[in-house]
Image: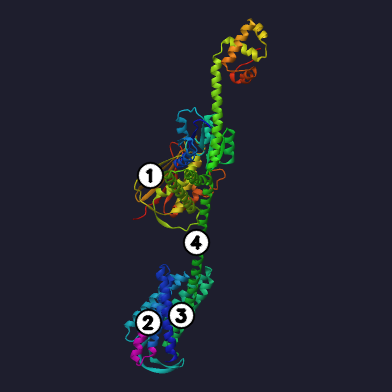
Amino acid sequence: MIPDPRVYLVDDAPELRRALGRLLALEGLQVSAFASAEEFLAAPPLTQPACLVLDVELPGLDGLALQERLGPRPALPIVFLTGKGDIPMSVRAMKAGAVDFLTKPVEAEALLGAVRAALERSAACVAEERARAELCVRLAQLTAREREVLEHVLAGRLNKQIAAALGIGEHTVKVHRGRAMEKLALDSVAELARLADRLGLEPAR
Amino acid sequence: MNPLTVLWSMLVGAGLVSGAVHALVWLRSREARASLCFALIAAGVSAMAALELWMLHSTSAAQYGERLRWFHLPVWVTVLALLGFARAYLGGGRTWLAWGAGLARTLSLALNFLHPVNTNYRSIEGLRTVRFLGADVPVPIGEPNPAMLVGQLSLFLLLAFVLDCARSAWQRGEQRRALTVGGSVAFFVGAATLQAILVFWGFVDIPVTASLFFAASVAGVGFELSSDLLRSATLARELQQRADELARERLELAHLARVASLSELSGSLAHELNQPLAIILANAQAAQRLLERAPPDLDEVRAILDDIVAADRRAGEVIRRLRGLLKRGESERRPLALQEVAESVLTLMRSELIGRGVELERRFAPELPPVLGDRVPLEQVLLNLVLNACDALATAPLGSRRIRLTSASSDGLVRLSLADNGTGLPADPARLFEPFFTTKPGGLGMGLSICRTIVTAHGGRLWAEPVSTGGSVFHLELPAARP
């Protein structure tokens, strides 16, 4: 279960906002509805998993323009709705990363399916983001020496070689290495190698 | 009853009938002077026949003389009317001949009434019975009056005038007319003149039968006139058929133009219908899910049903308006609120305007008088104007595309103006309304031309003006309906 998922609904017709809002609320989703792209942009930014159900034909900034304005935002996948969409329009939307492109009138199952997929994507993205943020915090706790040692470990060097390279005792290397692994909550070099990319760690030369 | 009485009574009747027919023609169209003259000729001949019949039943010389004197009155009418007819129907003819004939006849009529007996006889001593056309009829015995030379001169002049007219008709290429009308009038007037000379100067012993000759010429002329009437009736029918065809074609053309405009809007119209359908479907499926719960929230279900009904009505409204525009309509004029017609069109175009990023501003005057109009064509005009404005705005930057619709009324006129800040007008805005003139690639150039035809048919005006700040404004002005 995704924690506290929210659906942002942008459509200029209040009756449709109400109707779709009912369907989504019955699924246990929180819904925030907006009458225009501008209104949506003025809303405070979000932190929880969410998706955007977006009408293409909006007065002022239309749905596709809003998608462009938002830029690639994996944490906020878009499900498009259109009353007169054509193939080029849907291709454009999907290429820009939309989850789905649904035509009105839309079946509840189709909409809810798309919304669920979008929310899962968002949740994964949010979880990933959180894990990365957490790792970054931990990485920041490393001393310069500990970080240096880890970089040498990543390059595949033995403690003895590291000690020689850094001009310190082998025992000292062991202590730094043990503390660093502890701070990053890692058990093995394999795990370290797996996270290196996300941590922004480069092997030492 | 003797055969003469029967024949002459028939002459009276026939004269009256054909006179009445042509008098009616003249009453219907006052410029048909030939018909008026012909009606007078027929009436005169009818009266001549009546007086001749009366003369044939005279029992004394004095009675005969008196009746012969009155006989000259219809003769006078007939001669003048024949002069008028020849001029009106055949044309040409020397004017002095006509004046001469008319004056001589009038002088003869005056002499007739000034003289103790009449212009034909100085005195009538008695009556003799002669056998004529199987009947015994009285003829006078008396002394001829030389004054009748004036009357006979008038007949000669009339004959000359008619022949002169026939000649000019012939030269104009109207040989048929010259022959049937000129020929029959000249022949029978000549015959009547000859008979008058022979009878009144005492060369032959027969009664006067001038009406018979004149009736024959009436028949000849009447034949020609009726074929004229027949021809004009046929022409009128053909003209009406053409006019009907033209009206049908115009309706068809307007219909095609409407269909073309609507097909341009098809995407937006689909949206206009899909929107309520989407509202209905989502609401209905939400209600189904609600009802599966225990206990179902019936207040919410009620609210959902209200929304469904409203959306359904809205879809119905769109379809109704669309059907109106797609209908091959016969025209029907009724009082209309022009603003309401505009609103109806804007309802259909709502999503088209949104899709094209056009902002619409309405500045309607309150309390506009209604106009007398045919709803569908007027909707078509507005549809066209709004679509044109949208096209003119296509190259303007997004966010600055504006259409302003204003209304006003003054001096019994209602005006609707549609301004845009688009590409503006060609150098000569009047050309916009010419058929096949277009500024759009792939445009037919019929839209505004049809619009102007529609507005003109409503007694109104449609014109375009440039706007000083850029763009153009189209004015639609219609007369207000009289209360």
Residue type of the residue flagged with mark 2:
His
Image quadrant containing the N terminus of chain B: bottom left
* Secondary structure under the numbered disc 4 in the rendered image: helix
Q: Mark 1 sits on what residue?
A: B364
> Magenta part of the protein: which range?
B55-69
Q: Residue at x 43, y 75 (%)?
A: B21
Q: Quadrant of residue B96?
A: bottom left
Mark whose residue sits in front, 4 or 2: 4
Tell me, yes or no, whether the highlighted magenta stretch contains residue B37.
no
> Which numbered tag is attached to residue B72?
2
Q: Residue under mark 2: which chain is it in?
A: B
Q: Mark 4 sits on what residue?
A: B243
Q: Position of residue B252 (x, y in %)?
A: 52, 56
Q: Main secondary structure of the magenta part?
A: helix
Do residues under tags 4 and 2 come within 8 Å of each other at their CB atoms? Answer: no
Report crowding for label 2: few under 14, some 14 to 19, many 20 or more residues within 10 A (C-alpha). Answer: many
Q: Position of residue B195 (x, y in %)?
A: 45, 85
CA gap, disc 3 and disc 1: 77 Å
Q: Residue under mark 1: which chain is it in?
A: B
Residue type of the residue flagged with mark 3:
Val
Image quadrant containing the C terminus of chain B: bottom left
